[in-house]
Image (tube, rainbow, N blue to C red):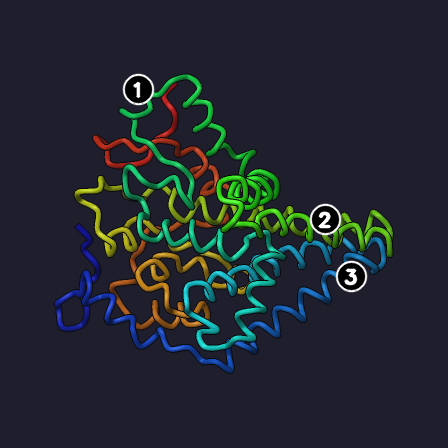
Amino acid sequence: MVKPAAVPDGTPRTGSALVRATFPYSEEDVGRTWRELAITLVILFSAQALAVAGPMLLRPVGTVIAALTIVRLFIIYHDALHGAVFRKSRVGYWIMSAVGMFTLNPRSIWRETHDYHHRNNCKLPGTAIGSYPVVTTRMWRRMTPAEKRKYTVARHPVTILFGYIFLFLLGMCMAAFVRNPKEHWTGAVAPVLHFALAALVGWTFGWTAAFTGVILPQFIASALGGYLFYAQHNYPDVQYAPRAAWTYHDAALVSSSYFRMSPVMHFFTGNIGYHHIHHLNHKIPFYRLPECMAAIPELQSPGETSWAPADVWAALRLKLWDPTQKKMVPFPR
Protein backbone atom coordinates (compact mmCIF):
# COMPACT_ATOMS: atom_id res chain seq x y z
CA MET A 1 0.00 0.00 0.00
CA VAL A 2 1.25 3.49 -0.86
CA LYS A 3 2.24 5.61 2.12
CA PRO A 4 2.76 9.13 0.76
CA ALA A 5 4.21 11.98 2.73
CA ALA A 6 1.70 13.79 4.91
CA VAL A 7 0.08 17.01 3.83
CA PRO A 8 0.22 19.96 6.26
CA ASP A 9 -2.93 18.91 8.17
CA GLY A 10 -1.52 15.42 8.71
CA THR A 11 -3.98 13.54 6.49
CA PRO A 12 -2.21 12.35 3.35
CA ARG A 13 -4.35 11.87 0.30
CA THR A 14 -4.36 8.53 -1.49
CA GLY A 15 -6.28 6.89 -4.29
CA SER A 16 -8.96 8.92 -6.03
CA ALA A 17 -8.54 11.82 -3.56
CA LEU A 18 -4.94 12.21 -4.67
CA VAL A 19 -5.95 12.05 -8.33
CA ARG A 20 -8.52 14.79 -7.71
CA ALA A 21 -5.81 16.94 -6.14
CA THR A 22 -4.04 16.93 -9.52
CA PHE A 23 -7.10 18.09 -11.50
CA PRO A 24 -6.26 21.83 -11.36
CA TYR A 25 -3.01 21.06 -13.22
CA SER A 26 -4.88 19.30 -16.03
CA GLU A 27 -6.02 22.59 -17.52
CA GLU A 28 -4.34 23.23 -20.85
CA ASP A 29 -2.85 26.62 -21.68
CA VAL A 30 -3.61 26.56 -25.40
CA GLY A 31 -1.30 29.46 -26.21
CA ARG A 32 1.57 27.80 -24.38
CA THR A 33 0.92 24.49 -26.13
CA TRP A 34 1.36 26.16 -29.51
CA ARG A 35 4.43 28.09 -28.32
CA GLU A 36 6.05 24.90 -27.03
CA LEU A 37 5.41 23.19 -30.35
CA ALA A 38 6.72 26.17 -32.33
CA ILE A 39 9.90 26.32 -30.24
CA THR A 40 10.41 22.60 -30.73
CA LEU A 41 9.96 22.74 -34.50
CA VAL A 42 12.28 25.72 -34.89
CA ILE A 43 15.00 23.93 -32.94
CA LEU A 44 14.46 20.71 -34.88
CA PHE A 45 14.52 22.30 -38.32
CA SER A 46 17.58 24.38 -37.43
CA ALA A 47 19.43 21.39 -36.03
CA GLN A 48 18.59 19.20 -39.00
CA ALA A 49 19.67 21.95 -41.40
CA LEU A 50 23.01 22.07 -39.56
CA ALA A 51 23.28 18.28 -39.64
CA VAL A 52 22.50 18.16 -43.36
CA ALA A 53 24.25 21.19 -44.84
CA GLY A 54 26.42 22.72 -42.13
CA PRO A 55 30.22 22.62 -41.91
CA MET A 56 31.36 19.02 -41.56
CA LEU A 57 32.83 19.61 -38.09
CA LEU A 58 29.52 21.01 -36.83
CA ARG A 59 27.25 18.38 -38.32
CA PRO A 60 27.57 16.06 -35.29
CA VAL A 61 26.32 18.93 -33.11
CA GLY A 62 23.28 19.31 -35.35
CA THR A 63 22.73 15.55 -35.30
CA VAL A 64 22.70 15.33 -31.50
CA ILE A 65 20.47 18.38 -31.04
CA ALA A 66 18.09 17.06 -33.69
CA ALA A 67 17.93 13.69 -31.92
CA LEU A 68 17.16 15.29 -28.56
CA THR A 69 14.51 17.49 -30.14
CA ILE A 70 12.85 14.50 -31.80
CA VAL A 71 12.43 13.06 -28.30
CA ARG A 72 10.79 16.30 -27.16
CA LEU A 73 8.56 16.42 -30.25
CA PHE A 74 7.48 12.86 -29.58
CA ILE A 75 6.51 13.73 -25.99
CA ILE A 76 4.27 16.52 -27.27
CA TYR A 77 2.68 14.00 -29.64
CA HIS A 78 2.36 11.51 -26.77
CA ASP A 79 0.58 14.17 -24.69
CA ALA A 80 -1.74 14.98 -27.58
CA LEU A 81 -2.86 11.36 -27.86
CA HIS A 82 -3.56 11.35 -24.12
CA GLY A 83 -5.76 14.42 -24.59
CA ALA A 84 -3.46 16.62 -22.51
CA VAL A 85 -2.72 19.08 -25.33
CA PHE A 86 -4.39 20.06 -28.64
CA ARG A 87 -7.68 18.85 -27.17
CA LYS A 88 -9.97 20.84 -29.46
CA SER A 89 -7.72 21.72 -32.38
CA ARG A 90 -8.23 20.03 -35.74
CA VAL A 91 -5.03 21.64 -37.01
CA GLY A 92 -3.22 20.30 -33.97
CA TYR A 93 -4.73 16.86 -34.63
CA TRP A 94 -3.31 16.69 -38.13
CA ILE A 95 0.05 18.12 -37.14
CA MET A 96 0.33 15.52 -34.39
CA SER A 97 -0.68 12.76 -36.82
CA ALA A 98 2.19 13.85 -39.06
CA VAL A 99 4.53 13.86 -36.06
CA GLY A 100 3.49 10.28 -35.30
CA MET A 101 4.48 9.23 -38.80
CA PHE A 102 7.74 11.20 -38.63
CA THR A 103 8.76 9.59 -35.32
CA LEU A 104 7.75 6.07 -36.49
CA ASN A 105 4.88 5.94 -33.99
CA PRO A 106 1.70 6.09 -36.10
CA ARG A 107 -1.38 7.28 -34.23
CA SER A 108 -3.47 4.08 -34.34
CA ILE A 109 -0.58 1.87 -33.23
CA TRP A 110 0.71 4.09 -30.45
CA ARG A 111 -2.74 4.71 -29.01
CA GLU A 112 -3.62 1.00 -28.97
CA THR A 113 -0.42 -0.14 -27.25
CA HIS A 114 0.14 2.84 -24.98
CA ASP A 115 -3.41 2.95 -23.67
CA TYR A 116 -3.03 -0.71 -22.74
CA HIS A 117 0.21 0.11 -20.96
CA HIS A 118 -1.49 2.75 -18.81
CA ARG A 119 -4.30 0.36 -17.88
CA ASN A 120 -1.87 -2.43 -16.98
CA ASN A 121 1.28 -0.67 -15.79
CA CYS A 122 3.38 -3.15 -13.75
CA LYS A 123 0.53 -5.64 -13.48
CA LEU A 124 1.42 -9.32 -13.50
CA PRO A 125 0.74 -10.95 -15.82
CA GLY A 126 -0.08 -8.39 -18.48
CA THR A 127 2.84 -5.97 -18.96
CA ALA A 128 4.14 -7.11 -22.35
CA ILE A 129 1.86 -5.03 -24.60
CA GLY A 130 3.10 -1.47 -25.02
CA SER A 131 6.00 -2.07 -22.65
CA TYR A 132 8.94 -4.35 -21.97
CA PRO A 133 7.83 -7.83 -20.88
CA VAL A 134 8.26 -8.83 -17.23
CA VAL A 135 7.88 -12.31 -15.78
CA THR A 136 8.33 -13.60 -12.25
CA THR A 137 11.19 -15.83 -11.13
CA ARG A 138 8.74 -18.73 -10.93
CA MET A 139 7.45 -18.10 -14.44
CA TRP A 140 11.05 -17.92 -15.68
CA ARG A 141 11.82 -21.37 -14.29
CA ARG A 142 8.85 -22.81 -16.18
CA MET A 143 9.65 -21.19 -19.54
CA THR A 144 11.03 -23.20 -22.44
CA PRO A 145 14.53 -22.40 -23.76
CA ALA A 146 12.96 -20.68 -26.78
CA GLU A 147 10.71 -18.56 -24.56
CA LYS A 148 13.70 -17.60 -22.41
CA ARG A 149 15.69 -16.53 -25.47
CA LYS A 150 12.81 -14.40 -26.73
CA TYR A 151 12.37 -12.76 -23.33
CA THR A 152 16.12 -12.15 -22.98
CA VAL A 153 16.30 -10.48 -26.39
CA ALA A 154 13.28 -8.28 -25.66
CA ARG A 155 14.96 -6.84 -22.53
CA HIS A 156 18.56 -6.83 -23.79
CA PRO A 157 20.50 -3.52 -23.77
CA VAL A 158 21.40 -4.06 -27.44
CA THR A 159 17.70 -4.18 -28.28
CA ILE A 160 17.23 -0.85 -26.53
CA LEU A 161 20.33 0.67 -28.17
CA PHE A 162 19.08 -0.40 -31.59
CA GLY A 163 15.53 0.62 -30.78
CA TYR A 164 15.39 2.41 -34.15
CA ILE A 165 15.26 -1.02 -35.79
CA PHE A 166 13.84 -3.40 -33.19
CA LEU A 167 11.39 -1.22 -31.26
CA PHE A 168 10.17 1.22 -33.88
CA LEU A 169 10.71 0.09 -37.49
CA LEU A 170 9.97 -3.57 -36.73
CA GLY A 171 8.13 -3.59 -33.40
CA MET A 172 6.01 -0.47 -33.60
CA CYS A 173 5.43 -0.23 -37.35
CA MET A 174 5.81 -3.49 -39.23
CA ALA A 175 4.61 -5.90 -36.53
CA ALA A 176 1.41 -3.88 -36.06
CA PHE A 177 0.86 -3.73 -39.83
CA VAL A 178 1.27 -7.50 -40.17
CA ARG A 179 -1.03 -8.07 -37.18
CA ASN A 180 -3.83 -5.85 -38.51
CA PRO A 181 -3.07 -4.29 -41.92
CA LYS A 182 -6.52 -2.75 -42.30
CA GLU A 183 -6.39 -0.83 -39.02
CA HIS A 184 -2.65 -0.20 -38.88
CA TRP A 185 -1.84 0.49 -42.54
CA THR A 186 0.18 3.51 -41.40
CA GLY A 187 2.65 1.02 -39.90
CA ALA A 188 3.79 0.25 -43.45
CA VAL A 189 3.56 3.83 -44.71
CA ALA A 190 5.64 5.45 -41.94
CA PRO A 191 8.90 3.56 -42.73
CA VAL A 192 8.39 4.20 -46.44
CA LEU A 193 8.05 7.94 -45.82
CA HIS A 194 11.02 7.88 -43.44
CA PHE A 195 13.36 6.28 -45.98
CA ALA A 196 11.92 8.38 -48.80
CA LEU A 197 12.91 11.49 -46.81
CA ALA A 198 16.40 10.05 -46.30
CA ALA A 199 16.63 9.30 -50.03
CA LEU A 200 15.49 12.81 -50.96
CA VAL A 201 18.06 14.37 -48.65
CA GLY A 202 20.73 12.00 -49.96
CA TRP A 203 19.91 12.77 -53.59
CA THR A 204 19.92 16.54 -52.92
CA PHE A 205 22.77 16.96 -50.43
CA GLY A 206 24.67 13.67 -50.53
CA TRP A 207 24.39 10.40 -48.63
CA THR A 208 26.52 11.61 -45.73
CA ALA A 209 23.94 14.36 -45.20
CA ALA A 210 21.13 11.79 -45.27
CA PHE A 211 22.91 9.81 -42.58
CA THR A 212 23.77 12.75 -40.30
CA GLY A 213 20.49 14.60 -40.86
CA VAL A 214 17.85 11.86 -41.02
CA ILE A 215 19.01 8.35 -40.09
CA LEU A 216 21.38 9.07 -37.20
CA PRO A 217 19.10 11.55 -35.35
CA GLN A 218 16.28 9.03 -35.48
CA PHE A 219 18.63 6.27 -34.32
CA ILE A 220 19.82 8.29 -31.31
CA ALA A 221 16.31 9.49 -30.46
CA SER A 222 15.01 5.92 -30.58
CA ALA A 223 17.76 4.69 -28.26
CA LEU A 224 17.11 7.50 -25.79
CA GLY A 225 13.36 7.02 -25.94
CA GLY A 226 13.67 3.26 -25.65
CA TYR A 227 15.82 3.54 -22.54
CA LEU A 228 13.60 6.19 -20.96
CA PHE A 229 10.59 3.96 -21.40
CA TYR A 230 12.52 1.03 -19.94
CA ALA A 231 13.92 2.84 -16.89
CA GLN A 232 10.63 4.48 -15.98
CA HIS A 233 9.23 1.08 -14.96
CA ASN A 234 12.41 -0.97 -14.47
CA TYR A 235 14.35 0.66 -11.66
CA PRO A 236 15.50 -0.77 -8.31
CA ASP A 237 12.57 0.49 -6.22
CA VAL A 238 9.82 -0.47 -8.67
CA GLN A 239 6.92 -2.55 -7.39
CA TYR A 240 4.94 -5.03 -9.48
CA ALA A 241 1.63 -6.49 -8.36
CA PRO A 242 -0.54 -9.49 -9.28
CA ARG A 243 -3.81 -8.61 -10.96
CA ALA A 244 -5.88 -9.22 -7.84
CA ALA A 245 -3.86 -6.72 -5.78
CA TRP A 246 -3.13 -4.17 -8.51
CA THR A 247 -4.54 -0.63 -8.28
CA TYR A 248 -4.19 2.23 -10.72
CA HIS A 249 -3.06 4.70 -8.06
CA ASP A 250 -0.39 2.47 -6.54
CA ALA A 251 0.91 1.59 -9.99
CA ALA A 252 1.46 5.29 -10.61
CA LEU A 253 3.19 6.07 -7.33
CA VAL A 254 5.29 2.96 -6.67
CA SER A 255 5.64 1.49 -10.16
CA SER A 256 6.62 4.62 -12.10
CA SER A 257 9.83 6.52 -11.49
CA TYR A 258 10.89 10.11 -11.21
CA PHE A 259 13.83 10.43 -13.62
CA ARG A 260 16.26 13.01 -12.23
CA MET A 261 17.77 15.17 -14.99
CA SER A 262 19.32 18.55 -15.59
CA PRO A 263 16.95 21.35 -16.65
CA VAL A 264 18.29 21.01 -20.19
CA MET A 265 17.46 17.31 -20.35
CA HIS A 266 14.05 17.86 -18.75
CA PHE A 267 13.44 20.32 -21.60
CA PHE A 268 14.50 17.90 -24.34
CA THR A 269 12.59 14.98 -22.80
CA GLY A 270 9.43 17.03 -22.34
CA ASN A 271 9.34 16.46 -18.57
CA ILE A 272 8.57 12.77 -19.11
CA GLY A 273 10.86 12.17 -16.13
CA TYR A 274 7.92 13.17 -13.90
CA HIS A 275 6.52 9.82 -14.87
CA HIS A 276 4.80 8.95 -11.62
CA ILE A 277 2.63 12.06 -11.98
CA HIS A 278 1.95 11.34 -15.63
CA HIS A 279 0.66 7.87 -14.73
CA LEU A 280 -1.47 9.27 -11.93
CA ASN A 281 -3.13 11.77 -14.27
CA HIS A 282 -2.19 11.58 -17.94
CA LYS A 283 -4.33 14.64 -18.75
CA ILE A 284 -1.72 16.97 -17.22
CA PRO A 285 0.18 18.78 -20.00
CA PHE A 286 3.91 18.06 -19.95
CA TYR A 287 4.75 21.67 -19.13
CA ARG A 288 2.66 21.57 -15.94
CA LEU A 289 4.12 18.41 -14.42
CA PRO A 290 6.89 20.21 -12.43
CA GLU A 291 4.30 22.64 -11.08
CA CYS A 292 2.11 19.76 -9.97
CA MET A 293 4.94 17.95 -8.19
CA ALA A 294 6.04 21.12 -6.41
CA ALA A 295 2.51 21.78 -5.13
CA ILE A 296 1.48 18.32 -3.89
CA PRO A 297 3.56 16.81 -1.06
CA GLU A 298 2.35 13.26 -1.70
CA LEU A 299 4.08 13.33 -5.09
CA GLN A 300 7.47 14.43 -3.80
CA SER A 301 8.91 11.09 -2.61
CA PRO A 302 8.84 8.79 -5.64
CA GLY A 303 11.29 6.07 -6.57
CA GLU A 304 14.07 7.66 -8.59
CA THR A 305 16.58 6.93 -11.31
CA SER A 306 18.86 9.07 -13.49
CA TRP A 307 21.30 9.13 -16.39
CA ALA A 308 24.21 8.45 -14.01
CA PRO A 309 26.14 5.38 -15.25
CA ALA A 310 25.58 3.59 -11.94
CA ASP A 311 21.81 4.11 -12.21
CA VAL A 312 21.76 3.01 -15.85
CA TRP A 313 23.70 -0.15 -14.99
CA ALA A 314 21.43 -0.84 -12.01
CA ALA A 315 18.34 -0.56 -14.21
CA LEU A 316 19.69 -2.66 -17.07
CA ARG A 317 20.60 -5.52 -14.70
CA LEU A 318 16.97 -5.96 -13.65
CA LYS A 319 15.34 -8.84 -15.49
CA LEU A 320 12.78 -10.71 -13.34
CA TRP A 321 10.27 -9.90 -10.63
CA ASP A 322 10.88 -11.87 -7.43
CA PRO A 323 7.59 -11.99 -5.48
CA THR A 324 9.39 -13.30 -2.38
CA GLN A 325 11.86 -10.42 -2.17
CA LYS A 326 9.32 -8.01 -3.73
CA LYS A 327 11.87 -6.53 -6.09
CA MET A 328 13.30 -6.86 -9.58
CA VAL A 329 16.36 -9.10 -9.76
CA PRO A 330 18.96 -10.13 -12.39
CA PHE A 331 18.79 -13.42 -14.24
CA PRO A 332 19.83 -16.37 -12.06
CA ARG A 333 23.39 -17.53 -12.58
* Mark 2 → mark 1, Cα distance in angstroms: 42 Å
Residue 127 horizontal/vertical position (percent): 35, 41
| Residue 170 higher or lower than 96, as above or below | above
Q: Which mark is residue 195?
A: 2
Residue 115 horizontal/vertical position (percent): 38, 54
* Mark 3 → mark 2, Cα distance in angstroms: 20 Å
Q: What secondary structure is marked by label 3?
A: helix
**Mark 2 vs mark 1: in front:** 2
Q: Earlier in the sequence, mark 3 or mark 2?
A: 3
Q: Give the residue at mark 1.
A: 142
Residue 198 horizontal/vertical position (percent): 76, 51
Residue 193 horizontal/vertical position (percent): 69, 53
| Residue 74 higher or lower than 179, as above or below | below
| Residue 16 higher or lower than 237, as above or below | below
**Mark 3 vs mark 2: in front:** 2
Q: Are discs 2 and 1 less than 8 Å apart at CB?
A: no
| Residue 169 higher or lower than 296, as above or below | above
Tell me the kind of residue under disc 3: Leu
Q: Residues within 10 Å of mark 3 (few under 14, many from 20)?
A: many
Q: What secondary structure is marked by label 2?
A: helix
Tell me the kind of residue under disc 1: Arg
* Res 136 → quadrant: top left
Q: Which mark is residue 50?
A: 3
Tell me the kind of residue under disc 2: Phe
- How many marks the image carries: the answer is 3
Q: Residues within 10 Å of mark 1 (few under 14, many from 20)?
A: few
